[in-house]
Image (spheres, rainbow, N blue to C red):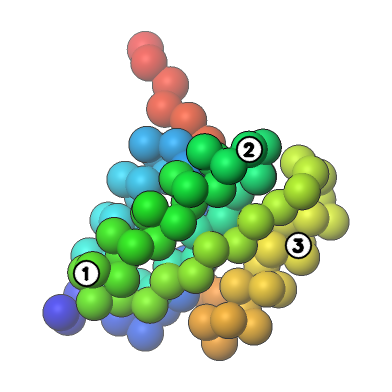
Amino acid sequence: MAGYMDGKVAVVFGGGSEAQRGVALALAQAGADIAVAGLTRDLAAEAALHSISNEIWALGRRSTVVTLAADDAPSFAAAVVKAQDELGHADLIVRADAVLNA
């Protein structure tokens, strides 16, 4: 699957939200490998992250789940480092927590 994001790695934060899912899948369809990142508030939130990652693998792209314990800058930085360790590098970081309705 060739696309404008071939060879790129994106770290997509969003806690398993539908916004995160949409962004992550669009980037994967464009050719990127994806680190799905989010806070682990409960088992359902972690399951949502893994579900998104599984959908990315089904598209033929690599994916990993990166969980955070707190919503602060050091934990976000640690998540990016973990994503780089698992997928080789990070070209794009996206925070897709929610969709705003106008």
Q: Is residue 45 above or below residue 34?
A: above
Determine which residue is flagged by label 3: 77
Where on the picture, by quarter, is residue 50?
bottom left
Question: How many numbered discs, if any?
Answer: 3
**Which residue is identified by label 2?**
42
Crowdedness of circle 1 by 10 Å Cα count: few (<14), some, many (20+)? Answer: few
Residue carrying label 1: 59
Which is nearer the N-term, disc 3 or disc 1?
A: 1
Q: Residue at image x 69%, y 63%? A: 79
- Find the distance from the CA under tag 1 to the CA under tag 2: 27 Å
Mark 2 closeness class: few <14, some 14–19, many ≥20 residues within 10 Å: few
Q: Is residue 51 visible?
A: yes
Residue under the image location 55 percent in, 48 percent down: 46
Separation of marks 2 and 3 at Cα, in angstroms: 21 Å
Q: Secondary structure at mark 2?
A: loop
Residue 48 in percent (x, y) is at: 45, 45
Residue lying furthest left? 1
> Residue lying furthest top in this view?
102
Name the image quarter holding residue 78.
bottom right
Looking at this view, is 1 or 41 the one in front? 41
